[in-house]
Amino acid sequence: MNRPTLRDVLEARRTISPYVQPTPLTGYTALNKVFDADVRLKHENHHPLGAFKVRGGVNLMAHLSPQQRQRGVITA
């Protein structure tokens, strides 16, 4: 499998944006002090769907071939 390119990432962003809201970044004063930097964390587990890998799943489903769609998808 090839590494994704910037073009791949931007296309995926366009594909999933109607379905997945951006996850906010949260700052932590204690981490800022430890690292002497403005540290922001992105808590994917706080996503409204309750899943942190939803973006990849939505993008994968959006790019299924008609034959793959016909066979169906099972998720867990």
Image (cartoon, rainbow, N blue to C red):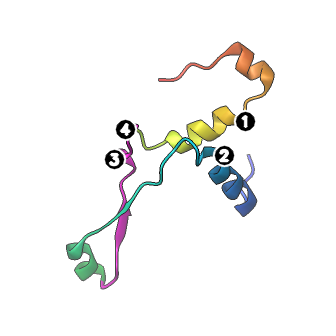
Per the image, label 4 sits on a secondary structure element best described as loop
44 on left or right of 29: right
The segment highlighted magenta reads 36-49
Type of amino acid at the residue the image marks with label 4: Gly
Residue of label 2? 15
Q: Residue 63, which numbered label? A: 1
Type of amino acid at the residue the image marks with label 2: Thr
Q: Earlier in the sequence, mark 2 or mark 3?
A: 2
Residue farthest along the left direction in this orientation: 30
33 vs 45: above or below: below
Per the model, the C-alpha gap separating discs 4 and 1 is 23 Å
Q: Residues within 10 Å of mark 1 (few under 14, many from 20)?
A: few
Q: Earlier in the sequence, mark 4 or mark 1?
A: 4
Per the model, the C-alpha gap separating discs 4 and 2 is 20 Å
71 vs 51: above or below: above
Per the model, the C-alpha gap separating discs 3 and 1 is 26 Å
- Asked if disc 3 and disc 4 are in contact, CB closer than 8 Å, the reply is no
Would you say residue 3 is visible in this rendering?
A: no
Per the image, label 3 sits on a secondary structure element best described as helix
Q: In the figure, residue 62 lies in which quadrant?
A: top right
- Asked if disc 3 and disc 1 are in contact, CB closer than 8 Å, the reply is no
Q: Residues within 10 Å of mark 3 (few under 14, many from 20)?
A: few
Per the model, the C-alpha gap separating discs 2 and 3 is 21 Å
- Asked if disc 1 and disc 2 are in contact, CB closer than 8 Å, the reply is yes
Residue farthest along the bottom direction in this orientation: 36
Residue of label 4? 50
Q: Residue at x 61, y 20 (%)?
A: 73
Residue of label 3? 46
Q: Residue at x 43, y 44 (%)?
A: 52
